[in-house]
């Protein structure tokens, strides 16, 4: 994996700049235009994103004012937090499914190394994934449901950007 790829839920973002645009537009959607303003000043708008930016400028894209009032996670941090959580969960998922040279999975190799059953390693990894979500929820003062919803929103935006 190269330095410009970001693992998330088993996939990668090929272009680091795309994440900046996703986070900036998401923050704008929730009434914080500071990230988008800084990004537009420092970088050229990629041609694929111009219709999205134009819809913001001409007013056809509306901000989520009511939703923004209820946010517990700052608008300008939402997607970066989701990215971080997602990368950690992606590493755990990768550990469960990655194959080694002999066709054995990394999970099976670790179980053999520790002298335990693969299901025990899998359960431990699943507990680690839950702990990541719980820690994030505790640190942000939100529920695990809110973290799951944030991750779902992140996944959707990543898969469909710029058509969000």
Image (cartoon, grey):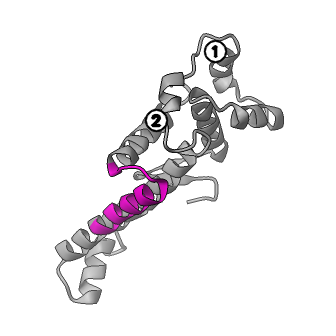
Task: Judge from the rendering whether residue 81 lies leftward or rightward of residue 39; answer left or right.
Answer: left
Structural crowding at the residue carrying mark 2, measured as other residues with C-alpha within 10 Å and reported as few (<14), some (14–19) or many (≥20): few
* Image quarter hosting the N terminus: bottom right
Q: Can you give x and y, in whole percent of width and height, for residue 151 in the image?
A: 41, 45
Say which residue label 2 marks: 159
Rendering coords of residue 5 (x, y %):
58, 53
Along the horizontal axis of the image, is 88 left or right of 102?
Answer: right
Residue at x 64% of width, y 15% of height: 55
SS at badge 1 = helix
* As drawn, 5 above or below 162: below
| Residue 31 found in image quarter | top right
Q: Residues within 10 Å of mark 1 (few under 14, many from 20)?
A: few
Is 135 part of what is drawn in magenta?
yes
Helix, strand or loop for the magenta stretch, by majority: helix
Of residue 94 and residue 22, the one placed in the foreground of this image is 22
Residue 128 position in % (x across, y down)? 33, 68
Question: Dot 2: what SS?
Answer: helix
Residue 55 bears which disc, if any?
1
Q: Is residue 87 above or below residue 40?
A: below
Q: How many marks?
A: 2
Chain part drawn in magenta: 127-144
Seen at 67% across and 21% down, the residue is 53
């Amino acid at each position: 994996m190269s330095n410009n790829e970001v693992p998330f839920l088993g996939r990668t973002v090929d272009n680091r700049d795309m994440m900046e645009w996703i986070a900036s537009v998401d923050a704008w959607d929730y009434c914080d235009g500071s990230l988008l303003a800084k990004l537009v000043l420092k970088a050229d708008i990629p041609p694929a994103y111009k219709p999205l930016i134009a819809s913001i400028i001409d007013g056809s894209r509306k901000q989520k004012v009511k939703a923004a009032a209820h946010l517990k996670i700052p608008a300008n941090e939402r997607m970066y937090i989701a990215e971080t959580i997602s990368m950690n969960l992606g590493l755990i998922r990768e550990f469960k499914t990655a194959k080694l040279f002999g066709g054995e999975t990394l999970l099976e190799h670790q179980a053999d190394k520790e002298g335990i059953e693969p299901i025990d390693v899998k359960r431990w990894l699943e507990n680690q994934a839950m702990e990541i979500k719980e820690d994030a929820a505790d640190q942000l003062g939100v529920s695990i449901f809110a973290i799951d919803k944030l991750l779902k929103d992140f996944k959707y935006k990543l898969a469909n950007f710029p058509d969000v």
